[in-house]
Amino acid sequence: MATGTEPQPLTGVHDASRAAIAPRHLRTDRWWLAPAVTAAGLLAFVVYSTWRAFVNDDYYAAPYVSPFYSPCVADNCVPMRGGPNADLIGSWWGLSPALLILIFPLAFRGTCYYYRKAYYRGFWASPPACAVAEPHKKYSGETRFPLIIQNIHRYTFYFALPVAAFLTYDAVLAYRDEHYRWGHMGLGTLVFTVNIVLIWAYTLSCHSCRHIVGGKLRHFSKHPVRYRLWGWAGKLNQHHMLLAWASLISVSLADLYVYFLATGAFDDPRFF
């Protein structure tokens, strides 16, 4: 019977309160593969997005604008005909205009519950995998700096919504050609359409979205509309991990596609 005076368990599997098992774990599968692949994927995106954000070039090829640079709100933006190009910041901003925009979707993704799990395991080995002891001597959770900043996730959701709205506008403009004529459809049109569908699906599958639409309701029967929205958000939330990766890949491919068009690597294949 516990008396409350017992020493606190130490980390790992070598604690006296646990079975005396010599190995660090008893797993025989390649448990390290999943966190290694996750870390490699996230690292690849960080390197690519950082390069594209600072290069400040080749982000517009009519009628497509890179999602990394939209909406373009600085004076040094490349003129985009019909696109969300507004001089709100002024000419004092001399760096890449992407840095003014990417901070919002990156803050949303960086504090996302799934991405926390991904990079906690992939980069910090906290924990490396299920039933594998983590190498850290103590764990304070997200109650201290800097991890306490993760609590801003519920607020970053509100900033992610207008960014998704601007990208929706860009996807609509992708159905116009360089002469403002509607009815254009090229490979880039499909790329941007798929991208915005995945971005909205990922955004609305967020745990914060599910909580906002129905998390505080005491009686679902009194709020049928919010209950229906809560149910839809819950169904999307079941695929949150898949949507997180799919949207991350799609937004990178959309930017890469614009880059290839802007640099003249190839022309946009048109269907009509």
Image (tube, rainbow, N blue to C red):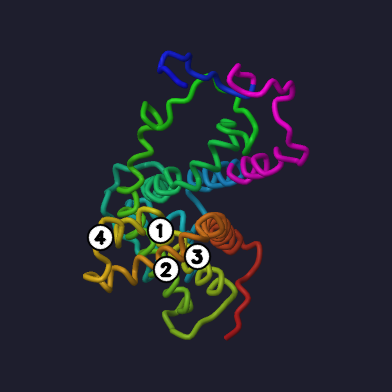
Q: Measure the C-alpha gap from mark 1 to mark 3.
A: 17 Å
Residue of label 3 = 198
Mark 1 and 2 residues: CB-CB less than 8 Å, in contact?
yes
Q: In the visual, does 82 lie left or right of 226?
A: right
Q: Write down the quadrant of residue 26 in the picture.
A: top right
In primary-sequence order, the first of circles 2 and 4 is: 2
Instruction: Name the front one of labels 2 and 4.
Output: 4
Percent position of residue 242, x then y: 56, 58
Q: Write down the quadrant of residue 85 in the picture.
A: bottom left
Magenta-colored span? 14-42
Q: Amino acid at mark 3?
A: Leu
Above/below status of 83 relative to 136: below
In primary-sequence order, the first of circles 4 and 3 is: 3
Residue of label 1 = 70
Q: Is residue 23 magenta?
A: yes
Percent position of residue 94, x then y: 37, 42
Above/below status of 119 relative to 241: above
In primary-sequence order, the first of circles 4 and 1 is: 1
Residue of label 2 = 170
Percent position of residue 134, x then y: 60, 27
271 and 161: which one is in front? 161
189 and 82: which one is in front? 189
Instruction: Name the front one of labels 3 and 2.
Output: 3
Q: Residue at 21%, 70% (x, y): give it.
A: 222
Q: Residue at 59%, 31% (x, y): give it.
A: 125
Mark 1, secondary structure of its residue: loop
Q: Measure the C-alpha gap from mark 3 to mark 2.
A: 14 Å
Mark 4, secondary structure of its residue: loop
Residue of label 4 = 217
Q: Residue at 27%, 73% (x, y): give it.
A: 224
